Amino acid sequence: MMKTRQNSLVITAIGNDRCGIVAGVTQVLFEAGCNLEDSSMTLLEGEFAMILVVEMPPELDLSLLDKHFDKVRKTLGLEVVLKRMILEKSSVSLPSHMISVYGADQPGIVYKVTHLLAEKNVNITDVNTKRVDEKGASLYMMVLEVELPSGLDQDSLKKDLEVLGKNLSIKITLHPIETLTL
């Protein structure tokens, strides 16, 4: 059974790239007494997007915090959405492996690779893709961080990825992620 993390939120914000977006959003959080626990922010084709995991003070009402974002919505042209978290902290996935995909661009690369992973119950924790035009050809690169389910035969997954890569005329590799102990 999933439980709500009472004071934890996921906040998404997206808008045309411009200076001050990160400062504007984090200022609202700071002034409301919120703590930024985790984030991912990126620029794609002129659009800046962020996903934030935030802990808010117990006495702060979600609708009031949402209202605090009205100024950045207006001045920075952002779409901002706040959502209560549904996961317990102990259920957070940690990636164990990295999958690299490289080859000639073609429709369906992301779908076919992720479909194979879904069939094997492999959880995707991060994806980055990039199309690069080089010497008159379009190359496609994708890097996925994944969590392999216990009991999955890694050699079998590697072989399935290699077969898929061969069918698509692209290179797909699976590597364990080395963790550092601090």
Image: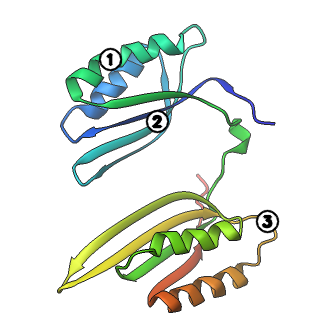
Of circles 2 and 1, the one toward us is 1
The amino acid on which the numbered mark 1 sits, given as a three-letter code, is Asp
| Number of residues whose C-alpha sits closer than 10 Å to that of mark 1, classed few (under 14), some (14–19) or many (20 or more) | some
In-image side of 87 versus 151 (left or right): left
Which residue is at a point 43% across and 70% down the rendered structure image? 142
Separation of marks 2 and 1 at Cα, in angstroms: 17 Å
Binning the other alpha carbons within 10 Å of mark 2 as few (below 14), some (14 to 19) or many (20 upward) gives some
179 and 71: which is toward the camera = 71
Who comes first in sequence, dot 3 or dot 1? 1
Specify whether 16 is left or right of 41.
left
Task: Give the percent coordinates (x, y) of residue 98.
Answer: 55, 69
**Front-most of 149 and 160?**
160
Chain-order first, disc 2 or disc 1: 2
Is 123 rendered above or below residue 116?
A: above
Q: Position of residue 175 (x, y in %)?
A: 58, 76
- Which residue is pictured at 76% across the width and 35% down the height? 2
Task: Determine whether the residue tagged by mark 2 lies in a helix, strand or loop.
Answer: strand
Outermost residue, front direction?
Answer: 107
Q: Amino acid at mark 2?
A: Leu
Percent across and percent down for residue 52 are 46, 36
Q: Are marks 3 and 1 in contact (CB under 8 Å)?
A: no
C-alpha distance separating marks 3 and 1: 45 Å
In which quadrant of the rendered view does residue 95 lie? bottom right
- Which residue, given by chain and number where applicable, does mark 1 sit on? 70
Secondary structure of the residue carrying numbered label 3: loop
Label 3: how many residues lie within 10 Å, few (<14), some (14-19) or many (20+)? Answer: few
Q: Which of the labelled discs sits on residue 52, or is there none?
A: 2
Mark carried by residue 150: 3
Q: Nearer the viewer, mark 3 or mark 1?
A: 1
